[in-house]
Amino acid sequence: MMITSAVIFDLDGVLTDTAEFHFIAWQAIANKLDITFDREDNEKLKGVDRENSLKYILAKGNLVVSTTEFELLLKEKNDQYLTLIDEVNPSHLFDGVLNCFTVLKKSNVKIGLASASKNASLVITKLGIEHLFDFIGDAASVANSKPAPDIFLSVAHGLKVSPKNCIGVEDAVAGVSAIKSANMFAVGIGDSKVLTQADLVFPSMSEFDFKRVETAFLLSAT
Ligand code: B16
Ligand code: MG
């Protein structure tokens, strides 16, 4: 019988909503460059790392900048993002997350974090849940960002479990692709019409039902 060794969570859009802060910070950069950047654009950047997000914005504006300017823009965006997330506190944790973690701990299932954000540890600390993780992945230390499987595989390695015994939880299309490329069972949080690659989708974390996840996981392996 297959046993779930670990559940590996994405951060933004699964445990909390930092997308609005990314949006405000990227829009300020885009405005400065005279490039239109709306919420539709922001949706496309969910799960996409900082460098590739800036590349997307520059391509949208048909703009080419020097390496120095590129680095300065990344720093400016991140400085503003850090100012914005200063207000993050435990009340920003999505409903259902603490309950889900309690169920996993009772079931002896390890908990990992696989975020594309280099600020993930800071956000997790501000949310007051750092102590609940068995391993927190480091986005800065992996070669390829989502949809590549690297961050999910590095977290499985850090947790000392086999990827085939892991379940990944993601809200972004690129993130679900990363989980599937890592050969893990993918749980999507959001719209099943959007997260078509996911093995199972819940509209939000408050509907996450570990029994249903395990049953579907077992069935998928037979
Ligand atoms: P940073 P996730 C991702 O977090 C966000 O969805 C994405 O919008 C952001 O650009 C990326 O982190 C990088 O964040 O600039 O803080 O390193 O969804 O993978 O938890
Ligand atoms: Mg996400």
Image (tube, rainbow, N blue to C red):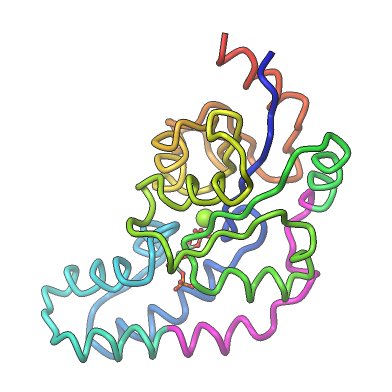
Query: For the N terminus, which image quadrant?
Result: top right
Asked which quadrant contains residue 218, the reply is top right
Q: Nearer the viewer, residue 158 or 168?
A: 158
- Main SS of the magenta part reads helix
The structure residue drawn at horizontal position 42% and vertical position 43%, both measured from the top left corner, is: 178
The structure residue drawn at horizontal position 85% and vertical position 39%, both measured from the top left corner, is: 103
Asked which quadrant contains residue 44, the reply is bottom left
Residue 15 lies, with reference to residue 84, above or below; the image says above
On the picture, is 160 further left or further right than 186?
A: right
Q: Nearer the viewer, residue 171 or 67?
A: 67
On the picture, is 156 further left or further right than 103?
A: left
Residue 17 lies, with reference to residue 87, above or below; the image says above
The x and y percentages for residue 91 are 80, 69
Q: Is residue 95 magenta?
A: yes
The x and y percentages for residue 211 are 78, 25
Q: Which residues are magenta?
A: 78-97
Q: Nearer the viewer, residue 27 or 45?
A: 45
On the picture, is 199 further left or further right than 46?
A: right
Q: Nearer the viewer, residue 156 or 92?
A: 156
The structure residue drawn at horizontal position 50% and vertical position 47%, both measured from the top left corner, is: 152
The x and y percentages for residue 118 are 49, 72
